Each structure stands twice: as structure tokens, then as C-alpha cells.
Image (cartoon, helix red, strand yellow):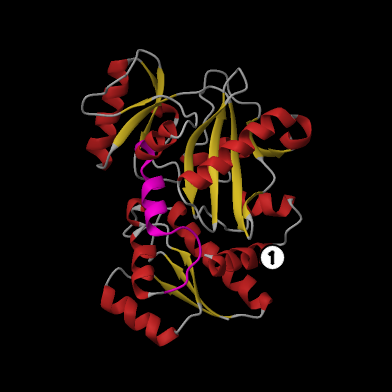
């Protein structure tokens, strides 16, 4: 097949979360070469005429969509699948509707709650309905990759929540909301489309090893993107919940399958959880088209399942054909 590897148009000097898209694109290209496919790497353009000319020139059988943001903003990522769909292209991953809905974290949480899937309580400005004097984590409503997430994001008390959200808005713009902070275990579960429905890869738990006392246990921006940092070194991915805790694993599995159905997911996705002290999983968010660089969590879960990286890429291509 002829495959267009379409990635974000990353500006020089971009931060590491944006550069990761280019790393993934190169890795996908190597895998495609190993699989015997013809491929072309190109940056995405949101100009309809330029995109149409690119597509006409390359003539791909499938577009491998690695567009994670436009002009550095993840909230604009759904533009890529929408334009590819308008062109009539076959492309990997989620469609525009599923991506747009799951990119909006408060909207995702409302959909989950309506469908009976447990998620932490939350509150949004301007009315801050339901906000209590508890501990919350203040997050961007539309951006991913732990955007501006650090220890200061975890605050206690209504006024501190409002101050943190206002400060983030003044510095970075966009929408911000507060989610109840669940001080429990964290799981990131990779889900891959198969002919007969979603297939869960081995479940990964993010373990905060030798974590400094008093620091909130969160996978913040530094932990994700600075490999030499204390936060990264001491945030370790563990597998084995299926064998060691089958009851918990079944609860996680059931929630993942419900999420796949609720949001009409396709291709591949990652569902992030916190587990309460009572052993109940709560869905934090759903990541469509999560990072698939060779060192990312999705590739690690595939490797744990005995899948080579090129086999993972082949499965994602086949899922696009199925869709």
C-alpha cells in the first residue's frame, strides 16, 4: 500500500510534547518500510486547497494520521480527520466527532455520567456549580499531554481552586476546570480495534516509587517529557493486574469497553483511570490517537502483549481498513 504519514506541522524550537509527533512519524515510517509499504511523510496543513493538492499528488491508499495539534493547540486536532473525511480518505485512528468530544474533558465526563460510567466529580467556571471545600486538580479542558500540570495544580478549598483556574486562564488562555483529586492508584489502558471489537492490551499501572512525602502523586508535564527528571525516573510503569487482581482488572476492562461504545471509538485509544481506596475505578479521560512513539505507553503495552512495533503499526492500518 501507499501510506501518507501525516504529522503535525511542528515549529522550530517547539516543546518536547510537540516534537514527540515527529519522533512517532519517523518510527511509523521505519515500521512501514519493514512491512513493505510505500510511504511519504508530510506535515498537515489546514488550508483545504493545499491539503487537496497534497492528497492528489501523493494518492495514498491510507493516511496514517499523527496530527496531535495545529499551531501548537491540541484542541484543533479534530480538524485533521474532518478534512480527511471530507476528501474521502481512509485514515487511521478516531474520526473527527469522537476526537472532538473526548478532547473536551468536561463534556466527556458528562457523557460518562449519563451512561453510568464512574468518573470523579468536577466543576467549571463561571458558576462553579457543585464545587466543594475538598481537594481538586485544576486542568485544561481542551489540551492534553499534561498541559501545565504540576504540583501547583492540586489545590484544596473553593477559593484556591478559583484562583488557580483564573491564573491559568490569564497566563495561557483557553478553558480550565477542576476535577476532584483522587489520591489513588493510576492506570493507563491501551485499547486496539480488532475485527470483533475492542481489544485491551496488558493494563499498565503508573507507580510513584519513592515519591517525596507531601507531593501529590500525578503524572505531570515534567514526568511525561523530561526523562532525566526525578518525576520521570520515579514514575514507573508496572504490568500484572490481570493476574494479581482479577476482580479489579475485570472492572477496568468493563469500563474500557463501555467507553469504546459510548464514544464510537475506532483505531486505537487509551483510557486513564484512578482507583479509589475502595477499589472502584474512575475514568479520568479518554485519549483518542494517543502517542505511539516506540517509548510511549501504548507501544509498551503492545510489547508486553508480545507484539513487535511493526506489528502494532500493521494492526492500526488494518483497523483503518475495517472502519
Q: Is residue 129 above or below residue 90?
A: above
Q: Does the rendering let one see residue 302?
A: yes
Which of the pair 318/76 is nearer the observer? Answer: 318
Q: Which element carries disc 1, helix, strand or loop?
A: helix
Which of the pair 254/142 is nearer the observer? Answer: 254
Q: Which residue is mark 1?
A: 311
Residue 300 location in percent, x, y? 67, 51
What residue is rendered at 30% in x and 78% in y? 50
Q: Is residue 64 above or below residue 166?
A: below
Q: Which region shows up in magenta?
A: 89-106
Q: Quadrant of residue 278?
A: top right
Residue 137 colored in magenta in the image: no
Q: Is residue 108 above or below residue 68?
A: above
What residue is rendered at 51% in x and 46% in y? 261
Residue 212 location in percent, x, y? 58, 23
Q: Residues within 10 Å of mark 1 (few under 14, many from 20)?
A: some
Which of the pair 260/180 is nearer the observer? Answer: 260
Q: Quadrant of the N terminus?
A: bottom right
How many numbered marks have been drawn onto this rendered protein structure? 1
Which of the pair 227/36 is nearer the observer? Answer: 36
What residue is rendered at 32% in x and 22% in y? 161
Residue 101 colored in magenta in the image: yes
Residue 46 location in percent, x, y? 30, 68
Q: Does the rendering let one see residue 229?
A: no
Q: Is residue 10 left or right of residue 252?
A: left
Amino acid at each position: 500500500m501507499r501510506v501518507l504519514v501525516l504529522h503535525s506541522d511542528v515549529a522550530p524550537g517547539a516543546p518536547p510534547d510537540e516534537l514527540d509527533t515527529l519522533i512517532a512519524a519517523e518510527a511509523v515510517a521505519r515500521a512501514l518500510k519493514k512491512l513493505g509499504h510505500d510511504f511519504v511523510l508530510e506535515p498537515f496543513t489546514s488550508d483545504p486547497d493545499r491539503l487537496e493538492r497534497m492528497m492528489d499528488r501523493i494518492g495514498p491508499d491510507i493516511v496514517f494520521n499523527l496530527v496531535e495539534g495545529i499551531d501548537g493547540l491540541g484542541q484543533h486536532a479534530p480538524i485533521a480527520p474532518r478534512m480527511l473525511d471530507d476528501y474521502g480518505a481512509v485514515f487511521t485512528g478516531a474520526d473527527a466527532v469522537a476526537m472532538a468530544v473526548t478532547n473536551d474533558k468536561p463534556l466527556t465526563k458528562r457523557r460518562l455520567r449519563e451512561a453510568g460510567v464512574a468518573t470523579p466529580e468536577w466543576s467549571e467556571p463561571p458558576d462553579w456549580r457543585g464545587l466543594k471545600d475538598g481537594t481538586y486538580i485544576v486542568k485544561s479542558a481542551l489540551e492534553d499531554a499534561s498541559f501545565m500540570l504540576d504540583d501547583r495544580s492540586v489545590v484544596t478549598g473553593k477559593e484556591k481552586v478559583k484562583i488557580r483556574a483564573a491564573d491559568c486562564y490569564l497566563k495561557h488562555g483557553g478553558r480550565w476546570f477542576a476535577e476532584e483529586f483522587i489520591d489513588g492508584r493510576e492506570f493507563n489502558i491501551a485499547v486496539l480495534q480488532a475485527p470483533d471489537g475492542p481489544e485491551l492490551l496488558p493494563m499498565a499501572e503508573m507507580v510513584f516509587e519513592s515519591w517525596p512525602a507531601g507531593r501529590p502523586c500525578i503524572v505531570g508535564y515534567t514526568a511525561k517529557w523530561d526523562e532525566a527528571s526525578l518525576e520521570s525516573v520515579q514514575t514507573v510503569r508496572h504490568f500484572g493486574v490481570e493476574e494479581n487482581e482479577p476482580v479489579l482488572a475485570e472492572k477496568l476492562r468493563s469500563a474500557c469497553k463501555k467507553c469504546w461504545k459510548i464514544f464510537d471509538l475506532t483505531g486505537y485509544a487509551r483510557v486513564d483511570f484512578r482507583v479509589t481506596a475502595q477499589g472502584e475505578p474512575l475514568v479520568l479521560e479518554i485519549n483518542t490517537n494517543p502517542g505511539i512513539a516506540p517509548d510511549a505507553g501504548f507501544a509498551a503495552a503492545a510489547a508486553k502483549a508480545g507484539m513487535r512495533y511493526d506489528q502494532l503499526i500493521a494492526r492500526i492500518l488494518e483497523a483503518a481498513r475495517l472502519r
